[in-house]
Image (tube, grey):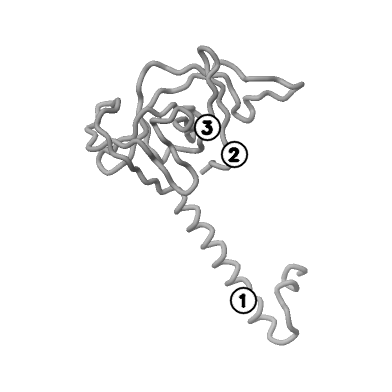
Amino acid sequence: MCSLKKLVRKGEKPLQQITRRLTEYESIVDIRQQENVQKIEFCASKTHYNGNLAGNRKYCSQYKILSNNIININVADTRNNCVMLKDNTIVNVVNIAKSNGSLYLIGRRCVKQKGLFTLGKFHSGTVSVNLVIESTFLEDWKCNMNRAKVFKISCSTVFITYPLSHTFV
């Protein structure tokens, strides 16, 4: 009852006011959902012809940069070529290619060795901060599997990976 009272601003025609406010609220929710859909669309740029390819697909073109309005992945820059997939797999991207109209990330899976630190009962793996080793095998993943960009720090034979919170899709 209290929430209905908040929707009424004047004393006259309360039912019409409630209907208008609920319609306004629904349109705002629809706009937010449309904005979320737009964030997922990726754009590939900087064509090249000498990248590594994986899998048994026929790739028609290769790219160096993959971006949307949140993430920018550059395979030529070791600081900007690591991503986290929706299943929390960390991938070091070495190429971006198109096959049958779909964009694919081609890269090496990073295998989790252990968490970076533990403070009491809190483990760094809880927030996906880990020590990882890069696999030697190339694999490919569809671009829509991308969840976030990952910052990686080289540390002798392993990497420290840290997902960037502002890049989660």
Q: Which residue is mark 2?
A: 165
Q: Residues within 10 Å of mark 1 (few under 14, many from 20)?
A: few
Q: Do we see residue 15 in this rendering?
A: yes
Where in the figure is residue 153, as x and y percent of width and height? 55, 23
Q: Which residue is mark 3?
A: 150
Q: Is residue 10 left or right of residue 146?
A: right
Q: Is residue 18 left or right of residue 112?
A: right
Q: Amino acid at mark 3?
A: Val
Residue beneath the point at 35% across and 25% down: 139
Per the rendering, the mark at residue 35 is none
> How many numbered callouts?
3
**Please, what secondary structure does the residue beneath circle 2 have?**
helix
Where in the figure is residue 52, as x and y percent of width and height? 30, 25
Q: Which residue is mark 1?
A: 19
Q: Nearer the viewer, mark 1 or mark 3?
A: 3
Structural distance between the alpha carbons of marks 2 and 3 = 9 Å
Q: Do we see residue 54 in this rendering?
A: no
Where in the figure is residue 5, as x and y percent of width and height? 75, 73
Sequence-first disc among 1 and 3 = 1
Residue beneath the point at 35% across and 35% down: 64
Q: Quadrant of residue 18?
A: bottom right
Q: Amino acid at mark 2?
A: Ser
Sequence-first disc among 2 and 1 = 1
